[in-house]
Amino acid sequence: MQDIVLCSQQIEYKKPIPLYKALVALHRTEQNNVPILSDDDVFIHEVIKNHEISSVKVVKFVGKGSSAVVFETEDGNILKLTTGNHFPLNRPIEDFDTPIFKKGKIGKIRYYFEEKLYQHGLTNGFVDIVRDMIKQKGYKTYDLYDMDIQQIGISKEGKLYLLDPECAKYKTLFHALFDKCGRLFTKLF
């Protein structure tokens, strides 16, 4: 494991490596005596099926959530791999969501190439701004409380975004269905 440098929850690679090799290395790397990725990890099994994605060069493992792993790519973007749709109840991408350059599906997983955002200098007031942006679009906030600065980021241009789309959900299932019907109706006419 001499090709990686552990730094808290993140892992920086000394030189860019293909995504597949980074996933395999995570399988072998432990934090608190627990492998970061398990033997049956779906990301390893699915990424190998797509040469274009498996060969993407990554420079950093940013983190792992309940259903996602996140890397920084060689070109300075973020690559998220998820086991489900990144957006709750398949809600549309909103202007408060991190900009996505490319997305797709490989077997049981989805991938998203996103703009890299920064978190240094953010304060509680910025969390309030993002919460208000979400509410103005008619969604409820989830897991976005005071001091949840880790859920937001700021672009190089100074625009605030929500890092985790799971933090903005439809108010009810009825709202989700109503929105879907409205978007379908708009496409038809």
Image (cartoon, rainbow, N blue to C red):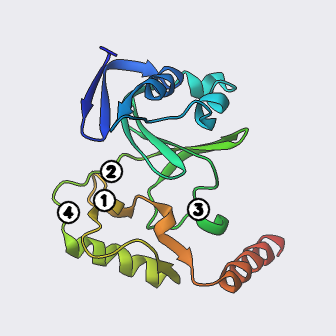
Residue occupying image coordinates x 27% and y 76%: 146
Q: Would you say residue 151 is visible in this rendering?
A: yes
Q: Which is nearer the eye, 68 or 134?
A: 68
Mark 2 Cα-neighbour bin, 10 Å: few <14, some 14–19, many ≥20: many
**148 or 153, which lies in front?**
148
The residue mark sitting in front, 3 or 2, is: 3
Position of 180 compared to 97: left or right?
A: right
Counting from the top left corner in percent of width and height, residue 171 is at 57, 84
* Point 30% across, 29% down: residue: 12
The answer for how far apart the CA atoms under marks 3 and 2 are is 18 Å
Q: Which mark is residue 150?
A: 1
Q: How far apart are marks 3 and 4 (CA)?
A: 24 Å
Under circle 3, the secondary element is loop
Instruction: Pick whichever of labels 2 and 1 is earlier in the sequence.
Output: 2
Name the residue type under label 1.
Gln
The amino acid beneath tag 2 is Leu
**Residue at the far front in the pictured view:** 33
Residue 172 vertical position relative to residue 112 in the rendered view, above or below = below
Q: What residue type is labelled 3?
A: Phe
> What whole-number distance in Å separates the C-alpha atoms at marks 1 and 3?
18 Å
Mark 4 / mark 2, whichever is N-terminal: 2
Q: Does the CB distance between marks 1 and 3 fall below 8 Å?
A: no
Which of marks 4 and 3 precedes in the sequence? Answer: 3
Q: Which numbered disc, 1 or 4, marks the residue that appears first in the sequence?
A: 4
Q: Is residue 118 or residue 173 the one in the foreground?
A: 173
Secondary structure beneath label 2: loop
Q: Identify which residue is drawn at 50% across, 53% down.
A: 66
* Mark 3 burial class by Cα count in 10 Å: few <14, some 14-19, many 20+: some
Q: Tell me the residue at 30%/59% (across/down).
A: 150
Q: Mark 4 points at which residue?
A: 122
- Judge the density around disc 4: few (<14), some (14-19), many (≥20) Cα neighbours within 10 Å: some
